[in-house]
Amino acid sequence: MPIRSRFAHLDTDTKEEKSDPNEVPLIKCEENPYPYPENLKVEELVPVKLLSPYSVDYVVWNKNYEEWGQKMLDVITSADLLGFINGTVQVPSRTVVTSVDGPNGGDTIHEERENEKYMAWKRSDALVQKWIMNRLTGAMKRRSMLALLRILSKIQTAKDLWEYITEMEQRLRINHYLPLHKAAIKGDWITVDNFIQKDQDAVRARITVNSETALIVAVKMVGGKNLVKSLVEKMKPDDLAICDNSGRTALHWAAGFGNIEAAELLADKNKNLPNMETHFKETPLFYAAEHGDRKMVDLLMRVLDHKLPKDEPGFRILYQLTHSQLFGK
């Protein structure tokens, strides 16, 4: 399973939860945009180091990556430094210009000096980089350092370093699941099943650059009917809710492609799927209405007990139904 969508969205919202004795201590620095908790012992909070992906099997490395990434993300978040890797903390200008009156009422003198905010930002950013590098194995650290030297102009901040590691993970994941991706496109259940037998997490893995699962890929294929059925039988209800990088589930895609058989299977196994919204607040019914698919609209309306979503999502569906001349028929 991905770590908070493979670090892609790095939530900044936190929910109040019960205290956990094993939880990373929360360090609040509300008035300081550039915290510097230099005494935090990252080696104790992130005991595992990130292995080099070329030193172990992918499945082993992926589990190591997930554990390392989640613990590292928790530490950075708890230290109020998440903005240094997700880009929400902007880099201040290196210098500032100040103006002072000249001697004896003379012309104003403009002076360029070092920006204290930039120095504070740089110090905090360097600390986050230090934490990340500290929790890499020797082989992984050497690989990261070579990348830093090779593309130094592109990797200068903690955000750059974090993105280098997560992008490397994506490349490895896509390459590992390429045979599964090809088999899903062909509707080849035998190959898909053999792959899943060797890597049980593959059934819920995001195997494409758009973070699609094998199920989503199969739903979009004309000859994927039997494969969809077999995958749905093998997956847990919550697995069917795994979405792509736009928030679309397999049911969204089934609704958009008019795949009635898949939609029935999905909605029957997970009753909440018809209510799920994409990042753009679009439900599967919106896709069916947008394509003017009467059969799909009828199916989803029955599942939803003929109730449209509230507020904007509902209004948008109503508009699409009217535009497709399906409303009231």
Image (cartoon, rainbow, N blue to C red):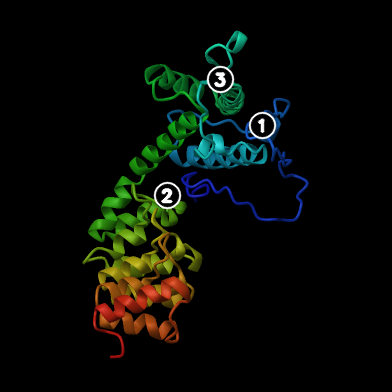
What residue is rendered at 49% in x and 51% in y? Answer: 1
**Mark 3 or 1, which is nearer the eye?**
3
Residue 217: which quarter of the image? Answer: bottom left
**SS at mark 2 in the image:** helix
Q: Provide the residue designation for mark 2.
A: 198
Q: Earlier in the sequence, mark 1 or mark 2?
A: 1
Residue 126 position, x and y percent, is 58, 23
Residue 67 lies left or right of residue 261; in this view the side is right
Residue 49: which quarter of the image? Answer: top right
Crowdedness of circle 2 by 10 Å Cα count: few (<14), some, many (20+)?
Answer: few
What amino acid type is highlighted by mark number 2?
Answer: Lys
Crowdedness of circle 1 by 10 Å Cα count: few (<14), some, many (20+)?
Answer: many
Where's the C terminus, which quadrant?
Answer: bottom left
**Mark 1 or 2, which is nearer the eye?**
1
Q: Provide the residue designation for mark 1.
A: 35
What amino acid type is highlighted by mark number 3?
Answer: Thr
Q: Provide the residue designation for mark 3.
A: 98
Residue 162 position, x and y percent, is 49, 33
**SS at mark 3 in the image:** strand
Q: Which of marks 2 and 3 is nearer the N terminus?
A: 3
- Near-viewer residue (112 or 74): 112
Crowdedness of circle 3 by 10 Å Cα count: few (<14), some, many (20+)?
Answer: few
Looking at the image, residue 2 lies above or below residue 78? below
Q: Do the residues labelled 3 and 1 touch (CB within 8 Å)?
A: no
The residue positioned farthest toward the front in the image shown: 105
